[in-house]
Image (tube, helix red, strand yellow):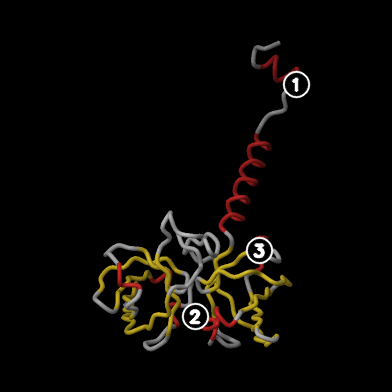
């Protein structure tokens, strides 16, 4: 579990791809400072497992499905990625609960300046519309942000200088692909609602006929 508060901008040192998987080597002295083999690290919002590391970098294995359904497959050596170590139970939750499981990718449609802020307009799949509300939370490339406006098929977020300086969103441009993870609480609520509705639909109506049939009348 993560918070969407980016700790470091790592640099892709190498990306070795086979037909069914890839190994990514990422430079980040900060992230490896207390790293252990098997630790979870969010790379552009994707929860990955550190398989090896040295004093300045670490490696992760990536399934082909992840390469195809996120923006990791488009990365090249020298490019930067957002990095966050897993949340400790004692940590402050500065962003929101982020699982590191990407729901979809979006494309930056517009990038406009509004005083100190830069506003990004990003597309999203129509089926995800139910998870987006103004002032709600969304993770973009692993960065916890507040939704400003929702106008399907796009939503907007506003980046303050601090966020632009410490994440990849500061140098993303129109046409770039971003990883999207929608609010996990909203997804759980949807599941509970659907489960409750299914149970109600499956429950027989309790009347005289039902009571008689089951020996109560």
At mark 1, the secondary structure is loop
Hey, which residue is sitting farthest right in the picture? 208
The local crowd at label 1, few if under 14, some if 14 to 19, many if 20 or more residues have their Cα within 10 Å, is: few
> Which disc is residue 207 wearing?
1
The local crowd at label 3, few if under 14, some if 14 to 19, many if 20 or more residues have their Cα within 10 Å, is: some
Q: Position of residue 94 (x, y in %)?
A: 53, 64
Instruction: State the residue in front, 129 or 84.
Output: 84
Looking at the rendered image, the disc whose residue lies closer to the viewer, 1 or 3, is 3
Q: Position of residue 108 (x, y in %)?
A: 61, 82
Q: Position of residue 138 (x, y in %)?
A: 59, 67
Q: Earlier in the sequence, mark 1 or mark 3?
A: 3
Indicate the quadrant where residue 202 lies: top right
Q: Are marks 1 and 3 in contact (CB under 8 Å)?
A: no
Q: Is residue 204 left or right of residue 139?
A: right
Label 1 – label 3 distance at C-alpha = 44 Å
At mark 3, the secondary structure is loop
> Which disc is residue 77 wearing?
none
Label 2 – label 3 distance at C-alpha = 22 Å
Label 2 – label 1 distance at C-alpha = 63 Å
Looking at the rendered image, the disc whose residue lies closer to the viewer, 2 or 3, is 2
């Amino acid at each position: 579990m993560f918070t969407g508060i980016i700790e470091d901008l790592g640099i892709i040192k190498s990306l070795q791809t086979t037909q069914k998987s890839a190994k990514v080597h990422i430079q980040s002295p900060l992230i490896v400072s207390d790293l252990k083999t098997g630790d979870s690290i969010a790379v552009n919002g994707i929860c990955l497992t550190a398989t090896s590391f040295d004093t300045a970098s670490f490696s992760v294995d990536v399934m082909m499905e992840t390469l195809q359904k996120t923006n990791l497959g488009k990365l090249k050596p020298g490019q930067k990625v957002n990095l966050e170590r897993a949340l400790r139970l004692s940590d402050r939750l500065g962003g929101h609960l982020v699982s590191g499981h990407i729901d979809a990718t979006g494309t930056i449609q517009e990038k406009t300046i509004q005083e100190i802020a830069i506003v990004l307009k990003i597309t999203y799949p129509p089926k995800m519309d139910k998870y987006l509300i103004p002032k709600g939370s969304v993770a973009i490339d692993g960065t916890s942000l507040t939704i400003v406006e929702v106008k399907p098929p796009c939503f907007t977020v506003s980046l303050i200088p601090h966020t632009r300086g410490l994440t990849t969103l500061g140098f993303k441009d129109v046409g770039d692909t971003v990883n999207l993870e929608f609010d996990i609480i909203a997804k759980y609520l949807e599941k509970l609602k659907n489960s409750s509705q299914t149970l109600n639909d499956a429950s027989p109506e309790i009347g005289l006929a039902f009571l008689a049939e089951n020996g109560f009348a």
